[in-house]
Amino acid sequence: MDDLYREVIIEHYKNPSYRGHLDPHDISFADNNPLCGDHIQVDLRVDNNGIVTDARFDGHGCAISQASADLLMETIIGKPVEEVKQLNKQDVLDMLGIDLGPVRLKCALLSLKVLKAGVYGLGEASDSLVE
Amino acid sequence: MTIPFMSLNIEQIRKDFPILARETQPGTRVVYLDSTATSQKPLAVIEAMNDFYRRSNANIHRGVHTLAEESTAMYEGAREKIAKFINAVSSRQVIYTRNTTESINLVAYSWARANLKAGDLVVLTEMEHHSNLVPWHMLQAERGIELEFIPVTGDGLLDLDVYRALLTRGPKLVSFTHMSNVLGTINPAAEIIRLAHEAGALTLVDGAQSVPHLPVDVQALDADFLAFSAHKMCGPTGIGALYGKADLLEAMPPFLGGGDMIREVKLRSFRPNSLPHKFEAGTPAIAEAVGFGAAVDYLSQLGMDAVAAHEHAITEYALERLEEIPGVKVFGPSADKKGGVAAFTLEGVHPHDVAQILDQDGIAVRAGHHCAQPLHEKFNIPATSRASFYIYNTKDEVDLLVNGIYKVKEMFG
């Protein structure tokens, strides 16, 4: 448990660096975790070379879902969109530095699902995007 | 309460539930505060089902051999016990289903599709579980029926003035929860039913939370339908019941088609069986029915007045202790108007995180919207943590919960 709520997670939850909206933006997408009602919106700016120049998230949810969203934004800024499309479950777990059971895994992966649905231009953030 | 009763011997009751001795990790005994989701099962139920499979298992009805006769008698005997438990006139009025959800769907598919047309009004409430919302949404899409909702007041009660106004529009059915699985509110079912009948409407009572926790008498309530599940009242999963008034059930078309629900089948036609079998197609959950009967025996022997009184005492104590924690907000009415449920939020901490940290100390609470999303939207919260209490819970366990919440506050402080 002390592992699960590592200092870094509580810190990103309480004092996120990338919470907010981008206006204008190039990509914006939002979705819920139907199990618990967690909500994440992601806004991205992408330059002509396909590089993510800025990223913000907003929403509400548990510490795991919000901290992983903040860490994810931090990770993708400066990266090519093509690279963002390749991010997977393990990348998020590596960012958080913890192992999660199946229920909490959905919390951790919500922001990645939303992000990938956005960059792929899909209508829905499905689980298959992060497996 | 006017009838005297023996108060429960909780220490003895706890010994009846083997799972309560479970340690979730070495030295941490489980504190089970999630009985609103599903109750734990006493040995009497576990052993009744075990014995059924060891001694009596056979398919029911039609068989003439000893085992088939025995299993049929056990299956039907359980139905008698359940009928008596809710004071139904006859066990013919008790239909086995999979659970409360299926019981409500049975009414929505069979009664409602035979009796409701476009524009007909069904009245629900804002505190319904999804199981008493979605079947009606589906019927609305299919038939064009109209839905209206009795509002929930800020303190978690139904607004009966609005209900009276809705009744002037001549609804065909009023379908409502007897006890909210989030707020714990015990609704004035007898009054709601009386008013509905005066307006010419039938009533469906969602008894998923009330039948396990309160004395429920379908004749005193004058309920037209009552839906409930075994697994929330010490019984197994996979079985529930629908009670209905005999004339209504007689007039309803069958729900699912297949074996056992027929009197006669020709290549191109069938005649349905009589009650209750008309609604029980296919091989049913026989061992589960036996377990359901054992659960009803167990609760009957404790006495439902005593069960309700114990839960009231625990809930009163829990609300008092929870409300003294800074940042905790408990939803729903005061203890005298609710059953053993305390749904709460802790300022600055998501309910999932609360539940996860409590789990570290073996404390099992639920977090989420508890299948009542519209109700959470009404209170403008995405989710709550919910502690719920049953016959085996103690004040010591409430204290452990409270200590656990202080620990959560410290971690997120």
Image (cartoon, coloured by chain):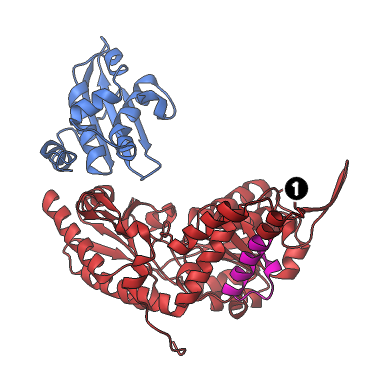
**Chain of the residue under label 1:** B
Q: Is residue B167 above or below residue B45?
A: below
* B303 sits to left or right of B355: right
Residue ID for mark 1: B259
User: Over which residues does the magenta segment extend?
Assistant: B73-95
Q: Quadrant of the N terminus of chain B?
A: bottom left
Residue A75, position in %: x, y? 19, 23
Q: Please identify the quarter of the rendering in which residue B164 is found.
A: bottom right
Residue nearest the observer in this picture, A85 or A52 = A85
Q: In terms of secondary structure, what is the magenta stretch mainly?
A: helix
The residue drawn where x is 32% and y is 17% is: A85
Palette colour of chain B: red
- Amino acid carrying label 1: it is Gly
Residue B90 within the segment the image draws in magenta: yes
Q: Residue at x 43, y 60 (%)?
A: B41
| Horizontal arrangement in the rendering, residue A12 relative to residue B160 (left or right) | left
Q: Position of residue B203 (x, y in %)?
A: 62, 68
Colour displayed for chain A in the image of the structure: blue
B157 above or below B381? below
